[in-house]
Amino acid sequence: MTRGDSDWEGVRLHIVTGKGGTGKTTVAGALALALAASGQTVLLCEVEGRQGIARLFDAPNRTYDEHRIAAVPDENATAGEVYGLAIDPEAALAEYLEMYYHMGRAVRALDKVGAIDFATTIAPGVRDVLLTGKVYEAVRRKEKKRTHARVYDAVVLDAPPTGRIARFLGVNAGVADIARVGPIRRQADSIMTMMRSPQTVVHLVTLLEEMPVQETADGIAELREAKIPVGAVVVNLAEQSPLDAKALTAASGGSLPRDDFTAALRETGLSADDETVNGLLTDAREHAVRVELENELRAQVAELGRPTYELPRLTDGVDLGALFELSHALTAQGMA
């Protein structure tokens, strides 16, 4: 699959969110690898201070710097790269003051007395403004052609959970309302322009469970109200039933042929007593009921009207090899 096959050609900022526990960090990592597989240089960012990227890629925890965490050769042997960055609000403020106001010495003095930490902790919204500002800076480097900083083809942001994603991404709109003029207003306007442009999309990760699907629907509604482009819905940890539709219907109704279970157990040399057979029939019925519910939730996800991709549940957990496997699944479905 080539880059032209991607559903998101032209997008430079992929923001990944989801209800806690849905695996949004894993999906963000897999997406970054999938984008790099086409020869792109990708920055994978996190903003919640959990060092989730380091754990996911089995890399050491790092301070505020951009460092390579994976090289990904494509079918033409052109290596794409993934860089990781854990954005720290205090460091982002120091960088902002130096970049836009040339206050390097003053920043170091403020840092020594704890003023920067105080500002990012106590001032409402400042933390999120700085975090989104750093993402903005990384995305727009291509336009600025800065020679002293790495230029990325795409940026993937492992963002806060769905419940606060619209507020997090829209924080600069509030800043723009407060700061009527000056550089702060100009930067806030620029960030919101990028967040609402076609080069940005927000992908939402869900599970086939009622609460995550409902939170995904609520998140899409809030993003649309904030005029922030909604991307795809990624159904994570999806499972395919080994039973066909006819067998699932029979299992759900408790009408699977008991004699077939007994014969199969005996053929394999296993115990075919009543307790074992009853247990298997109960498991089959519970499985069928769960599949029926998941299919209903799939239909609800489809009604959201967004491109949908599914990632399988991996029985051995997620290590770097599994992450590559998930990235291949996203590429095969057209997400990257």
Image (tube, rainbow, N blue to C red):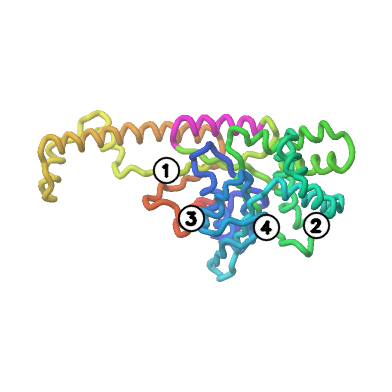
Q: Do the residues bearing badges 2 and 1 touch, measured as CB atoms within 8 Å?
A: no
Amino acid type indicated by mark 2: Lys
**Residue drawn 61% across and 46% down?**
49
Q: Earlier in the sequence, mark 2 or mark 4?
A: 4
Amino acid type indicated by mark 4: Asp
CA–CA distance between discs 1 and 3? 15 Å
Q: Earlier in the sequence, mark 1 or mark 3?
A: 1
Q: Is 146 or 80 nearer to us in this picture?
A: 146
CA–CA distance between discs 2 and 1? 41 Å
Amino acid type indicated by mark 3: Leu
Q: Which residue extends farthest front?
A: 113
Q: Earlier in the sequence, mark 2 or mark 1?
A: 2
Q: Do the residues bearing badges 1 and 4 touch, measured as CB atoms within 8 Å?
A: no
**Residue drawn 58% across and 41% down?**
17
Secondary structure of residue under mark 4: loop
Q: Which residue is the site of mark 1?
A: 238
Amino acid type indicated by mark 1: Ala
Q: Which residue extends farthest bottom?
A: 77
**Magenta span covers which residues?**
208-224
Q: Is 289 or 55 nearer to us in this picture?
A: 55
Secondary structure of residue under mark 2: helix
Q: Do the residues bearing badges 2 and 4 touch, measured as CB atoms within 8 Å?
A: no
**Residue drawn 64% across and 54% down?**
85
Q: Which residue is the site of mark 3?
A: 323
Q: Is 241 or 23 nearer to us in this picture?
A: 23
Q: Which residue is the site of mark 2?
A: 144
**Residue 242 rendering spot, x and y as whole percentages:** 30, 45
Residue 214 is inside the magenta segment: yes
